[in-house]
Amino acid sequence: MERERLLIDTSILIDHLRKTQKDKTIFYQLASQCDYLISAITEFEFAIGATPPNRQFTEELLNRLPILPFDSTCVKAA
């Protein structure tokens, strides 16, 4: 059975980045239930806001997430 896919927004990624207890974030808790996707806009917003201390974490996280192009299909899914 295929896992449910969930399109997540920048706020979910920022929450995960900022919390020291990663296992308490929505991102972490839902990861066992579904596969995440992000839009190209979310990729841009998250990457552009990365400060030097968080840049490596940000890049590693973005490398693991499938990125949807931002088009009409993505708008409807969001």
Image: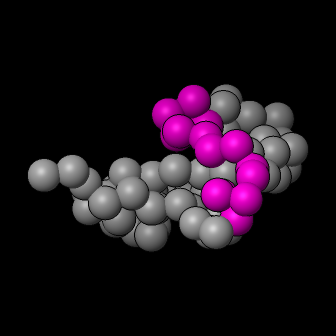
Q: Is residue 11 visible in the rendered structure shown here?
A: yes
Instruction: Tell me the quarter of the picture where residue 12 sits.
Output: bottom right
Q: Where 34 falls versus 26 (above or below)? A: above
Q: Hey, which residue is sitting farthest left in the picture?
A: 1
The image shows residue 30 at horizontal and vertical percentages of 35, 65
Depth check: give the residue in front, 77 or 22: 77
Q: Where 16 falls versus 70 (above or below)? A: below
Question: Is residue 72 toward the left or the right of residue 38 in the image?
Answer: right
Q: Where 47 falls versus 73 (above or below)? A: above
The image shows residue 74 at horizontal and vertical percentages of 65, 58
The image shows residue 41 at horizontal and vertical percentages of 78, 52
Depth check: give the residue in front, 21 or 10: 10
The image shows residue 4 at horizontal and vertical percentages of 31, 60
The C terminus - image quarter: bottom right
Depth check: give the residue in front, 51 or 36: 36
Q: How is the image coloured?
A: one colour
Q: Residue 64 lies in magenta, yes or no?
A: yes
Instruction: Tell me the quarter of the picture where residue 21 sits.
Output: bottom left
Question: Is residue 60 toward the left or the right of residue 28 in the image?
Answer: right
Question: Is residue 38 toward the left or the right of residue 70 in the image?
Answer: left
Q: Is residue 21 visible in the rendered structure shown here?
A: no
Q: Residue 5 lies in magenta, yes or no?
A: no
Residue at 52%, 50% (x, y): give it. 37
Start and end of the magenta stretch?
A: 62-75
Depth check: give the residue in front, 50 or 37: 37
Residue at 34%, 65% (x, y): give it. 29
Residue at 58%, 66% (x, y): give it. 77
